[in-house]
Amino acid sequence: MSSRLTDTGARDLLRLLETGEVSCVDVAAAHLDRIGAVDGAVEAFLSVDREQVLADAAEVDRKRQTGESLGRLAGLPVAIKDNICAAGAPATCASRMLEQFVSPYDAHVIGRLRAADAVLLGRTNLDEFAMGSSCESSAFQPTRNPWDAERSPGGSSGGSAAAVCAGMAPLALGSDTGGSIRQPASFCGVVGMKPTYGRVSRYGLVAFASSLDQIGPFARGVEDAALLLEIIAGHDPRDTTSVDQPVPSYLDTLDEPLKGLRIGVVPEHFGEGLDSDVETRVQDAIDVYRSLGAEIREVSLPHSKYCVAVYYIVAPSEASSNLARYDGVHYGFRAAEYDGLIDMYAATRGAGFGDEVKRRIMLGTYALSSGYYDAYYVKALKVRRLIRQDFDAAFQEVDVIAGPVTPAPAFRIGELIDDPLAMYLNDIYTISANLAGVPGISLPCGFTSSELPVGLQLMAAPFEEERLLRAARMYEREADVPIRRPPLGMLPGGSV
Ligand code: GLN
């Protein structure tokens, strides 16, 4: 029973819970046991409070027994990226700087999950402060890809993607600033979605680059991702960039195929550097849409060649400002030895931040400094506007843009960590959605010849999540990509 529960998706688990076939404690215990069995090898979680998880699950069972009204996720375990605040839980951001930090309050999305009676399962690993594409810049552990333990699960939300992939959680939350949900989803063969900027409140998400960050769902199927998005989306006055627009019921329309769907294919996304297996799988996926009657059109995003350059000015600039608060006074860590106030700041930040975070702070500080501000930051903002205009024009022509998520499948741990530029280029296809603020989803579209998952990326116009999810579901249903589970029995400690 227990392995069956960890193989079951969120909506099916809800049905089992509603009919009373299983209790919330059964579901929670099955996932905790699974974490116990395989996370020694995967290292997706930074912390799991087993007693609290079981107590929260028992409370949902009690409510059900006494006939109290229950929320829509009643009893479902959800794993949380360790940069999203939940009162009483750690939020380390995988940084020594916040190693001892315990959140005093709930993020908006956590409040929504609690109101829906979900069970917060544990805190997942990430690149330090969400800066990275591999989970290797975590100060605590590199998460491993459940499909191949030598490889990265991607990042920065690699812990959430690996947890969902390996059956340790049916659902998880991540954050995406330049691809951090979509890239790990594609590396692990799960569904991951970055909503429109402003669709989900960032209140309680530890800020990396505030004009790009969005929280979004991970699941093993499109329906489950739609369900989680429905719960967390919507206006929150505590985040002034969260938009006051009604949230459609994504699940209600999900299975209605889109008639006359126009799919845009961007030639710039199929250029040099694209792995041939990835290209073939993505082209096959586009053919599935063709066979469903969609019209496939070429559209151009002429400024997309500047995306990586623009992102690596804008994101570090915002990061250098956001991370100024970690000064040894306000939060967490303070160096043990120092000589005066300025030295206290320097010693604290020198010891508390890892190399990648320091690199970003230095890049950003430089780009914002007087004399360089116009040449770098202001210029990057101008090009960012052009990138958004490219998308506006493209979405006049097509409903959805389809292409690869990453240039290649999961790389080996250690392969790119000493080459920041090669690591940054992993985000070449995902960054543009953040710069333009449009929603994007990564969904599994098959495997390479070496049995690594490949992701298909779909993007839509702002606030067109409903259309995006329906288009994703069309493919998922028609392609019927066989559900394959990673060979965890091969991992040390794996029991499947
Ligand atoms: N990999 C990108 C970076 O390093 C994106 C990270 C993210 O989306 N949080 O900044």
Image (cartoon, helix red, strand yellow):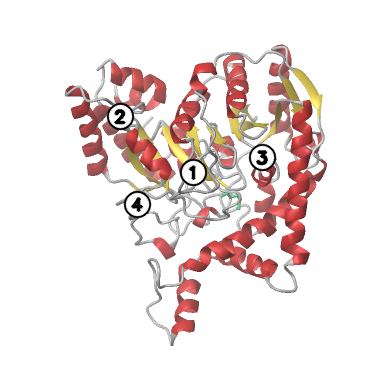
In the rendered image of this protein, does residue 472 appear above or below residue 429?
A: above
- Residue beneath the point at 48% across and 35% down: 233
Q: Is mark 4 within 8 Å of ligand 1?
A: no
Q: Nearer the viewer, residue 155 or 489?
A: 155
What's the residue type where badge 1 is placed?
Ser
Whether residue 464 is visible here, answered yes or no, is yes
**Measured Cα–Cα span from mark 2 to mark 3:** 34 Å
Secondary element type, mark 1 = loop
Mark nearer the viewer, 3 or 1: 1
What's the residue type where badge 2 is placed?
Gly
Mark nearer the viewer, 1 or 2: 1
**Measured Cα–Cα span from mark 3 to mark 1:** 27 Å
Q: Is residue 305 left or right of residue 407?
A: right
**Measured Cα–Cα span from mark 1 to mark 2:** 23 Å
Q: How crowded is mark 3: few (under 14 residues within 10 Å), some or many (20 or more)?
A: many
Mark nearer the viewer, 2 or 3: 2
What's the residue type where badge 3 is placed?
Thr
Q: Which of 6 and 484 is in front in this view?
A: 6
Badge number at residue 105: 4
Q: Is residue 382 left or right of residue 354?
A: right
**Earlier along the polypeptide chain: callout 4 or callout 1?**
4
From the image, tell me which residue sits under label 3: 406
Badge number at residue 211: none
Q: Do the residues labelled 3 and 1 touch (CB within 8 Å)?
A: no
Q: Residues within 10 Å of mark 4 (few under 14, many from 20)?
A: some
